[in-house]
Amino acid sequence: MKIDVFFTPVGLNPSDLAGRTVVVLDVLRATTTITVALAGGAKAVLPAASTEEALRIAQNLERDDVLLAGERRAVRIPGFALGNSPQEFASEAVRGKTIVMTTTNGTQALIAAQGAREVVVGAAVNFALVVQRARAALEQHSDLVMLCAGRERQFALEDAFAAGRLTKVLLPEGGLRRVEVNDGALASLEIARHFGERWLRALRASAHGRELAELGFREDVKACAEENTHPVLPLYADRRITAHRPPNEG
Amino acid sequence: MKIDVFFTPVGLNPSDLAGRTVVVLDVLRATTTITVALAGGAKAVLPAASTEEALRIAQNLERDDVLLAGERRAVRIPGFALGNSPQEFASEAVRGKTIVMTTTNGTQALIAAQGAREVVVGAAVNFALVVQRARAALEQHSDLVMLCAGRERQFALEDAFAAGRLTKVLLPEGGLRRVEVNDGALASLEIARHFGERWLRALRASAHGRELAELGFREDVKACAEENTHPVLPLYADRRITAHRPPNEG
């Protein structure tokens, strides 16, 4: 059994992800926001690498069905309908819509993960479902990757904590003796050990959490720290993120 | 007071290092080996980005005074006099020589640090002197950076541990309340908390440490884990690493 944690998509080799199940984590805020949007009834979220690409993708969709979303330096891109606050993505705003989204870190990580077998969008708000899916991947393929978005190409504490918390929950009985982990996974476990299950404390300790609070997004940080408020499992395939429906629900 | 830890040189912005004192850490093995070489009487170590650049630099030096050193995939580059094992850099081999060196991770991190005000080469083997110099930088400029070489553009546990151990020792009374740290520094402190002062345990737990042992470099890992065996402070300036002599010894 093998669990790898990468702290940023920068420096990844294609072989790090190819043929593997990857959980992408950008807790503050993109993967949280995407989960909230799909829980609110959005049809799909389409990640775009840049503002220009977002506009190009949107042009090829029905005007009434599409919403542009995204931030630069934490603030909504001028002219876009939505920023990157989970609260903006409540049901009324997004139901039935296709959201084209570009953010500084999260969408970059998602795009980097495109070569993987399966890409799961993970956050605190859908933690239990992510654990379930990740455990299934470990049972079927003995293999899992967590890809942290990080922040501006560097390490971010909040995503490393999320990866550590996930790794800790997934460790088989017998712990590290029964699983092969990379250095990132070992480090993330130490961070998770420090914060325990206290998402909010970890998020508030991070540089990004502190900056969001200063910019007036304190409520966002709180919303991003709540476990299982939005039990939806977003999967990213063919350039679209959609809510996974278990087969028996048709 | 400000302490930043970066886990790899990848993703650095020029402003992350400009005008600051930077401690470069590649404990397994380049910064250890460089320290051992200078302790053994080498005149200088010149980092090179590639085998080709190493050859080019060497051509401009007196043939009898120069030694080529370096590894790829942990093994000595064919035709080079030395690899990257600290043991190869004992006094007899290196005394009076200028060593042109290229390694997979360490020399890349050094080259990335070139824009800094002062670049200190740090390892376990010269830990006390690095602490002393880092503390002086904090007292004079309230500012310090630790740049981990990492491994093949990714996070490496051994360097993160070294950064955490150094951060821990340098924290002022009052701890984190009295110093501004980035997320990397916070994470490195958790790793240091786990391993305490046990360098060998941290190095052996790292993927790099385990691979070196498998490749027959078990003694290297041990040598790299010993504190203060080579009390020399290498400084990197004008593309040369030389042993710092305090002014009063001048």
Image (tube, coloured by chain):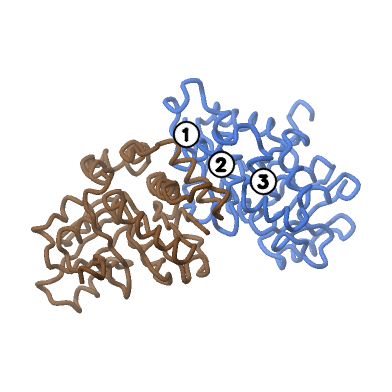
Chain colours: A blue, B brown
With respect to residue A46, does A78 lie above or below? Answer: below
Quick one: label 2, few (<14), some, or many (20+) residues within 10 Å?
Answer: many
Label 3: which secondary element: helix
* Quarter location, residue A71: bottom right
**Which of the two discs, 1 and 2, labels the residue nearer the N terminus?**
1
- Residue at image mark 3: A204
Query: Looking at the image, how many numbered discs can be counted on the residues?
Result: 3
Quadrant position of residue A78 = bottom right
Where, by quadrant of the figure, is residue A160 drawn?
Answer: top right
Q: Give the amino acid type for the residue marked by disc 3 in the picture.
A: Arg
Left or right, B69 with reference to B1: left
Q: Is residue A209 above or below residue B112?
A: above
Q: On the rendered structure, is B205 left or right of B193?
A: left
Give the residue pinned by disc 2. Answer: A146
Residue A79 x/y as whole percent: 83, 67
Q: Marks 1 and 3: CB-CB under 8 Å?
A: no
Task: Judge from the rendering whether residue A207 lies leftward or rightward of residue A225; answer left or right.
Answer: left
Is circle 2 on the same chain as circle 3?
Answer: yes
Q: Quadrant of the C terminus of chain A?
A: top right
